[in-house]
Image (cartoon, rainbow, N blue to C red):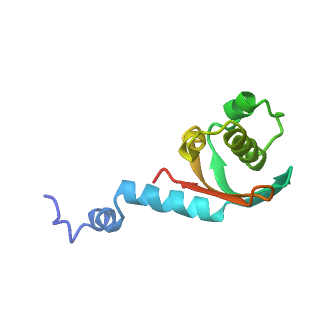
Amino acid sequence: MSMPAEDDPIEAQQEARPPRKLEATIMSFWRLQTECRSFGAKDEIFCLFQGSLGNLGSLKQQYGLAKNANEVLLVIEAYKTLRDRAPYPANHVVSHLSGDFAFVVFDKSTSTLFVASVSSF
């Protein structure tokens, strides 16, 4: 004989948990918020980056960067490509980046601010 759900402690515990998709969303958001922020500059282009790129390795090859290059340097190089080979829309560069991330790029030479935020949740 089975117990009603309210009398079964295991069933009640499962009902109290958030749905798996919501739980995954909360965990992804928490992970993004607790990851380190990185800051760097090159050629008077400054970048503040938070998060991670899932395809960093292939993008390093695409942009001809060293194996030890990080997300900040990659974003700066992607921005320079966008700037120097215009007219590309900004989403052209961002669409090639995968992962949960946000960044702000400031180009001192053109006084341009480029901001992007992408999240898989």
Give the tally of numbered discs.
0
- Asked if 50 appears above or below 96 in the picture, the reply is below
- Asked if 51 appears above or below 88 in the picture, the reply is below
- x and y percentages locating residue 62 in the rendered image: 70, 28
The answer to which image quadrant residue 93 occupies is top right
On-image quarter of the C terminus: bottom left
Q: In the orientation shown, which residue stands out farthest toward the bottom?
A: 6
The answer to which image quadrant residue 39 occupies is bottom right
Q: In the orientation shown, which residue stands out farthest toward the right?
A: 43
On-image quarter of the N terminus: bottom left
- x and y percentages locating residue 46 in the rendered image: 79, 57
Q: Nearer the viewer, residue 62 or 86?
A: 86
| Left or right: 44, with 80 as reference point | right
Q: Nearer the viewer, residue 114 or 101?
A: 114
| Left or right: 14, with 7 as reference point | right
| Left or right: 68, with 4 as reference point | right
User: Residue sitting at 59 percent across and 55 percent down?
Assistant: 116
Q: Nearer the viewer, residue 42 or 60?
A: 42
- x and y percentages locating residue 94 in the rendered image: 58, 44
- x and y percentages locating residue 86 in the rendered image: 64, 39
User: Residue sitting at 71 percent across and 38 percent down?
Assistant: 81
Q: In the orientation shown, which residue stands out farthest toward the left?
A: 1
User: Residue sitting at 58 percent across and 46 percent down?
Assistant: 90
User: Residue sitting at 70 percent across and 45 percent down?
Assistant: 79
